[in-house]
Every structure is written in C-alpha cells, then in structure tokens.
Image (cartoon, coloured by chain):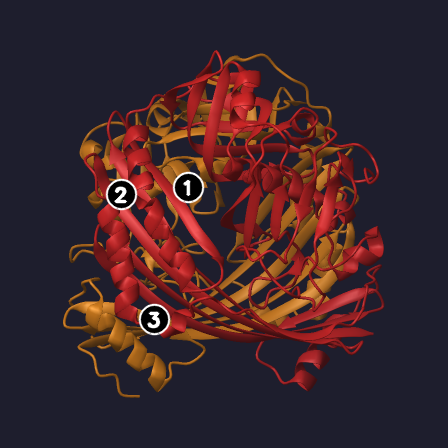
Chain colours: A orange, B red
Amino acid sequence: MHINADGWEIYEESVRSRYVSIENGKIKMIGEKKDSGKALRVIKNGRTAMVSGKTISHDLIDRAIKIARISEERLQEFPERKRLKDVKVYGIKLDDFDENAIGDAGERLEIEGVSSAYFYVEEIVRRIENSNGVDYEERESCAGVFVEAVVDGGNAYEYQESRRFDFEPEKIAERAIELARIDSRAEKIDTGKYSVTLSPIAVDQLLTFSLYPAFYTENIKKGRSLLSEFMGKSVLGDLTITDDPEIDYGINSCSFDDEGVRAEKKILVEKGVIKGGISDLIHADGFPTGNGFREDYSSYPATSPTNMVLDFPERGDAEGMYIHAFIGAHTANYVSGDFSLELMNASVDGKGIKGAMIYGNIYEFLRKISHFGRDVRQTGNTITPEIVFEDIEIKI
Amino acid sequence: MYYEIREVESYTLQLSLENGKFEKPRLSRFSGKSFRVLKNGFWGYVAGDYSVKEGLERAERLAIHEGNSEIDDCPFNGKVVFRAEKDFEDVDLEEKVQLLRDVDERLKREGVVSRRVVYIESLKRVRIENSSGGEVFCQVPRCGAVLQAFAKGKSLQFYSERHMKAGGYEIALSALNSAEKVSEIAVRLSNADPPPSGRMNVIMNPSLTGVFIHEAFGHAAEADHVLQNSSVLKDRIGSTVAEEGVNVVDDPALPEFGYFPFDDEGYRAEKKMIIENGVLKSFLNSRETAKRVGGVAGNGRADGIEIPIVRMSNTYIEAGDHSFDELLEEAKNGVVLYGSRGGETNPATGYFHFNAQYGYLIEHGGIKDMIRDVSLSGNTLEILKEIRLGRDVSFSPGFCGKAGQLVPVSDGGPFALVRAFVGGK
C-alpha cells in the first residue's frame, strides 16, 4: 500500500468478546462479538486528517490526503519508536470462556432481586504502526459484571471490571440487592450539613465529569479549565493524584497509548499542589504524555486519563452519610468545577435516604476531605478507597 | 426457531472548527453483520463478519439454555430511502468548511473566549431479514451542526445548540441563523449568578420539556424495564399517571433526528400514544416485549451491530392551551429554564435529575435576572400530576445512551409549568 503523504499512522483494533445477560433473575441470552477495523492518519504539509474503515482502501487514502490538504490540524510528525515498559494487561483467555463457561457464570447471577445483569469476557488487540518506525502491538483482556437490583420498589446497581477474573459475580449481585433493600425503606431527611462518605463509584463519577477534563492540556490552553490559574499552587488540600498506566492489571493500564506514545506515570497533584496536565499528541506542544486514546478504531484520538490513583495522608473508617452513587454526574461543569447531583443509594446508619441532593464546587469540595478509607478499588478511571468529607451540605 | 439477519453499513464525516481552526477532520466507514436465534425461549446472538450459514450456526450454538423469551415474528417487507432536500454528497468539502467559518464568524463577540462549531453528516443503510419471511431495507441520511461558545465574565460558562435532523445539507445551513444568539447567551451567562435552591415553580422551555419527557418518563415506558421489574410504570396501563389533557407520543415517522421507517428488528415504525388524556395507554416495545408485555413492536433499535433493545425515537408532550404569559402569571415566582446539558433518570423509582443550560428568575409574574449552573430534579409521576402546557411544540436532537448503546433521538414539547426541586447555591 502506497501512501503519498509526509507522514502516516495506521491504528488497528480487533475485539472479541462473549457475554451473558440476565433478566429478572433468569439467564436470557448468550452473545459473542468479533469486530475489527483500521484508522489511517496522514500528514501533508504539516496538516493532518483521519479516515477509518474495515480496511484502508485506495479511495480512503485519497480522501484522507484531500481532507489533510485543507485541514488546519497541525502535526509535524508521528512519535518515534521507544523502548516500552513491561505492563501486565492480559489476564484471562477468551477461549477459556466458551458458551458453557459463560452460561455457568450467568447462572451465578440467577438470584431473586436481580432485575438485569450481564457478565462478559473480552480480548482486545491494539496495533499501531507509523512512518517514524513505531510498530507496537498489545493484547489485553477484560472481564466484568454489571448488576441492577430491584427489591420491594427499591433499586440499586453495582459493578466490577478487571483484567482478570478475580471477582465473584454473585458477591456483586448480593451487594446490589442489599443496597436495593435499603433503598426500599428510604425516608426523607432534613436539609443540613453532614459528614459524608463517598464510595469509590461515587468518587469516580464525580471526578470524571467535574475534575479530570480540567487536567487536559487542550482545555487548559483553550480557556476551559481553572487549572491554568492554579498551576503550581496549593489548591486541593492534602490530596495527591497520579495518572498511572504502569500498574499491572490496572483496567486502563497500557504500555503505549492509541497514538503510539509510550505510556508513563505522571504526578498531577502532589499534596494539593497542581503539578501538571495530560495530553494527546495534537495538543501537546511536542511533549505528549501518552494519554491519546480512541473510544474505538473509528473515533478521533482524544485526551483521556488512564488510572487516576488518589492518595491522602490520613486513613480511617467511613463516617456519617454514605453515598454509593450519583444520578446525573455527567451534568457537572468541569469548566467552573460546579456540580449539583441527585444522590442514589445514600444512607445514614444503614437507613436509606430519599430524594436528596448534593452540590458545590469540586475545588472547594476536595479541600474538605477528612480522611480516606482503607480498601482500595478501581472503578472506571479511578483507583481509590472510600473518601470521607466533612461539613457537606445536603438538600432535600 | 426464529432467526434474524441484519447487515449494517454506515458512513460519517465530521468536521470541526475550534476557535476558527479547521481541526479533527474525520471520515469513517463501517460495515457489519449480526445474527440472532431464538430457540427454546433462549437467545443466541452473534455480531461479526460471517456468511449467513456460519453466522446462524454460531448463534444457534450459543442458544444452549432454556428460557421464557417469545416474540412477535410478524414479517414486514419494504424498502425506504429517505430523500434529503440537498444531498450532502453534492456539496464540496471546501463549501462545508466555509459554512463552518461563516458560523464561527458570527460566534465572535466580546467576552467569548473560545468557540467550537462541528459539522456532521452520516448515512446509515440497514437490511434485515427474518425466518418468518420479512425483509426490509432502509437508508437514512442525517446532517447538522453543533455550535458552542465559552465566555468569561464573573465565571467561565458555555452555551451550546444542536441543529440536527434526518435530512441533508439544508439542516446544517439552518445553523447559521442561531450563531449570534449562541454567543450572546454565553456572554450573558458568564455574568449570571447561581439560582436559589429549593422546591419552586419552574417553567421549562420546549427543549427542557422534551428532555424531561424523554428522561423522566419515556425510559420508564420502555417495556424491557417492565420485564426487568425495574419500571415505576409496571402494572399501570390503563391508570391515570398524569393530569387530564396530557398526551405523550413517540413518533419515529416524524422527519426529526430520531426518524426511522423500520426499526432494527425489521418491524414497521409507527406513532405510539404513550399517555392519552392523562391515562397510560401503552409501553414502547421490541418484538419480544410486545409479545410478553402486550402492545405493538417497532421500537427495537441498535447502535451498529449491537443487540436491538427498546428505545425511543421522537418523543414529545403534545401542546396545551396556555400562552407563555399565562404560564408566567400562574407561576408568579420561581424560575424559567432553557435547554439541557443532559440528564439521567432512575426508571425504577421515577427520580430524575438534569441540568438546564441557563434560566431566569421569575418574580411577580415577570422575568428578572439570568441564572446559571441550574439543575432540576424531582419525581416524574408527582410532576406529571400538576403540569400546565404551552401552545407550541418544538424538537431538540440528541443521542440517547442505554446499555452502552447510543442512538439518535429527538425530544419535544411546549413550554411547561411544573413544581420541582431546583439546585443552586
């Protein structure tokens, strides 16, 4: 294949998965998926464009070059080949999960109170090659379970994802059922200030939408992040945040990002002081951080965190109101840091709370951390234990 | 045994102008197939590039358990190609970029610190055949633009509008007319204050009324939630769920963003009355839920080659008879809220939460200061019991996410006065 460009990159992704779904406590379907595709980016006179498809045909190459000629997306070159770090990301073989094994896993979720659930195992092979000598390939695996439970009109969900099959699906289901049971007896409480404990799920939901995008170099440069004012200053109390793709079996661990940049650990916040941001290739000013990721092969690479590891000097027990999750976390405004969210499965001393809201500004909120819990868990992009906050206003 | 074969082909072109710079141009083509088999009440589903014989064999091999699934296997046959007024294939790339530049120029204004204009065109072709002899083909183009302005005043704020429909280049052209309004609102919003919080009278604009009816009510009317025992509307067919005079409709035949002529199970799409005069008339159904819960199928939709699940299309509350001034007068004090930054609902309990883009305080029946960062929450069924509806319905496009799948939808309604919880400082 001849590509008449100054630089090129081909990203290829193959996904194979098998899954089982459960409806109202009964196994309903077994499915499998096999999909693959390629994306080509070209550089022509310092300008770049991207096309994608099942295969990269001559017609697609021509379209890419035509679009690149008028594109104003500037890119001088694709990354050079580097020695990659060894990160473990492959912990389950899909071939060990044929329809019988997947069905067995599904049967473990046939529990009264489970309204819907699924369990899946997935293998992904990412490959990237460019005109600057990069030719990397990584095979990764993932298994996960998601359970929604309804008990006496009360409702809750719980989930777990891992690079390995190192969890018990029925335990996840039992936790969801217990939360739903508490929710079924939920009552109104009074508006007021409470000590509040956020579960790892709630922490991930809140930070993913109100804080993480503020670290993207693109948002900092375009006036869409307060961190341009806060860089080098102490604004987040004693909190430390590290973006760490090098953790063995971390859900978002990798040895290279989806643009062929070597993945590396970065300290973003050290004891409250803002230290730096994360970036994809295009917005990096020559120093990409290895955070350019694609949702799938056809989507444009964009900045995304890997594993955001949270740390705090004090550890202790959960206190006060316990918040399992939020409704509407994606409505938070990362530009200003403001959020106002509905609580889902909140409780005080095991008694459920009905229809309560929390609101505030993430930069003020994170200064109110009292201590961290002890059991660290990864949900989504965040690795954290429960976090206890003091003096938080809850409205009814 | 029932089987279904679906072949999907799609094409998307996305062009973005960020602060006047033409960035992230992306063209993608996709093709894929899926096969599903229902045997002994249990589903086997395969997505992948297999021959018909191999795909069906693989799907049957996965259907190894026994279950209680049944379906309405009614066959439909037909071919529908949606014709756009102005085919985007006939417009040069340079002209599309120039349109973005023209829109961007109109977004410029003192106080605006960042601008984004995105042009999107897509074409989806789907062919579905099933074991009962049905075979349908449809081709639907969608086109439009998203406008966004960030402004810095007392705080950093943004405002955005989407103009997207089933159709061609004419939809994107219509975005030109709203650029000045987008930047003006962004600048005023950046100098606005947060609203008071508490339970109060709220007038939702048509776009927010649409999000409300989609998020807070429509999801609970999806019959798969009924089968999962996770809908607050379970066992409520025939009962009064809203004030008399409230009609809620899902209509895939309207040429809005959620348009489709046949759903992704090859079932003919048609208008459904969900609430008629305050009474819950029907759920939205796939072939399976229609058979098991009762009702008419035609709302089984899929993202690419994923499994079809029950989804909305163009969902709206029909108009009432109040003028905007009458709504203001009736509200007396409270807020009027415009646009949506998305929302979420819990169909099992009816609790919902979403954020408006901006609003105004209402004092003594008059519109006062602008407010920012305002959220709205409450319980759907409580709100529908007391709702006053305005006279004109309009639609807003969006992508609805459910079970990890995104599909194009639109939501609509008139201005509506409700009592709900407003979150702010």
Q: Quadrant of residue B266?
A: bottom right
Mark positioned earlier in the residue sequence (1 or 2): 1
Q: Decide: is B246 above or below A288.
A: above
List the single residue furthest toward the bottom: A1
How many residues crowd around disc 2 within 10 Å: few (fewer than 14), some, or many (20 or more)? some
Q: Position of residue B117 (x, y in %)?
A: 31, 52
Residue B300 is left or right of residue A268, and the answer is right
How many residues crowd around disc 1 within 10 Å: few (fewer than 14), some, or many (20 or more)? many
Q: Decide: is B155 above or below A81.
A: above
Residue under circle 2?
A267
Q: Nearer the viewer, residue A86 or A186?
A: A186
The kind of secondary structure element at disc 3 is loop
Residue under circle 1?
A208
Q: Are marks 1 and 2 on the same chain?
A: yes
The kind of secondary structure element at disc 2 is strand
Residue B84 is left or right of residue A27, and the answer is left
Q: Position of residue A128 (x, y in %)?
A: 33, 72
Q: Nearer the viewer, residue A43 or B267?
A: B267
Q: Position of residue A251 (x, y in %)?
A: 46, 54
Residue name at image x 50 percent, y 50 percent: B398
Tell me the subunit letter for badge 3.
B
Residue name at image x 45 percent, y 78 percent: A54
Tell me the subunit letter for badge 2.
A
Tell me the subunit letter for badge 1.
A
Cα separation, mark 1 vs mark 2, equals 17 Å
Quadrant, the N terminus of chain A: bottom left
Depth check, mark 3 against mark 1: the one in front is 3
Three-letter code for the amino acid on which mark 3 is drawn = Val
The kind of secondary structure element at disc 1 is helix
Q: Nearer the viewer, residue B48 or A47?
A: A47
Residue under circle 3?
B91
